[in-house]
Image (cartoon, rainbow, N blue to C red):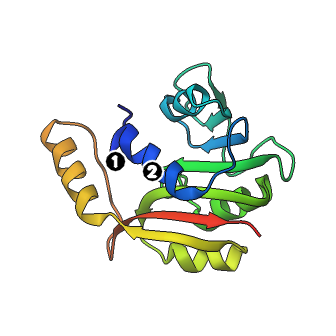
Amino acid sequence: MNGHLGGTQNTLHIIALSRLAPPPAKILDMGAGAGETVGLLRDMGYDARGIDIRPGNDMVEKGDFLRCPYPDAAFDGIISQCAFFVGGDVSGAFSEAYRLLKGGGVLMLTDVCLEDVEGIAGKTGFAVMHSEDMTARWQEYYIDAVWRGEECRHEQRGKCEYRMLICGKE
C-alpha cells in the first residue's frame, strides 16, 4: 500500500480509467517520492521511472519535476499523486507534463486543489477526459493522518478540494 490517498487501489483505478497505452509504454511519475507507484507500474510491465527532489529509492531520480531532464515528447503517460500542489507551481507542473508527453499521451493526476485545475489543464492544451471530486475521501485520510501524529501542514486558506483528473494531449 502506498502513501497516497486510496493507496495502491486508487493508483490502479486511475490507471484503468486513463486509457493509458499498454505496456511497455513509457511512464513518468512526477513527484515519485518513495517510488511505490514506479514499482507498481514496472510490475505491470511498463517502462516506468520517477523523479523527485527527495527520492526514496534508486527507482526514483533526484530532480525537480518542474524542470525535468527529459526531452520533449519522451513519455506515453505521466502520473502524479499529491505532488503538483506541493511543488508550488501548479501551472508550471501542467506545462512541464504537457511538454514531456507524446501526442495521444495521458496525464493522470490526484492532488489537493486550491485553483481551477480543469481550467489550468485546458489553458495548457490538455483535454480533460475525467474529473472526479475526491474531497470527502481526502478529508478522512487527512484527519486519520493527523490522528496518527503525522505531519500535515496546510497553511493556505480558501476553497480546497482533492481531485482526480485525467487529461489527454491531442
Q: Secondary structure at mark 1?
A: loop
Report the side of 145 relative to 103 (left or right): left
Residue at the image position 54 percent from the left and 76 percent from the top: 118
Q: Dot 2 corresponds to which residue?
A: 82
- Amino acid type at image mark 2: Cys
Alpha-carbon span between mark 1 and mark 2: 8 Å
Residue 166 point in image, percent of width and height: 55, 63
- In front: 163, or 103? 103
- In front: 113, or 8? 8
Q: Quadrant location of residue 91?
A: bottom right
Residue at the image position 69 percent from the left and 49 percent from the top: 21
* Front of the two marks 1 and 2: 1
- In front: 16, or 79? 16
Q: Dot 1 corresponds to which residue?
A: 5
> Which residue is at the far right?
71
Residue 138 point in image, percent of width and height: 28, 56
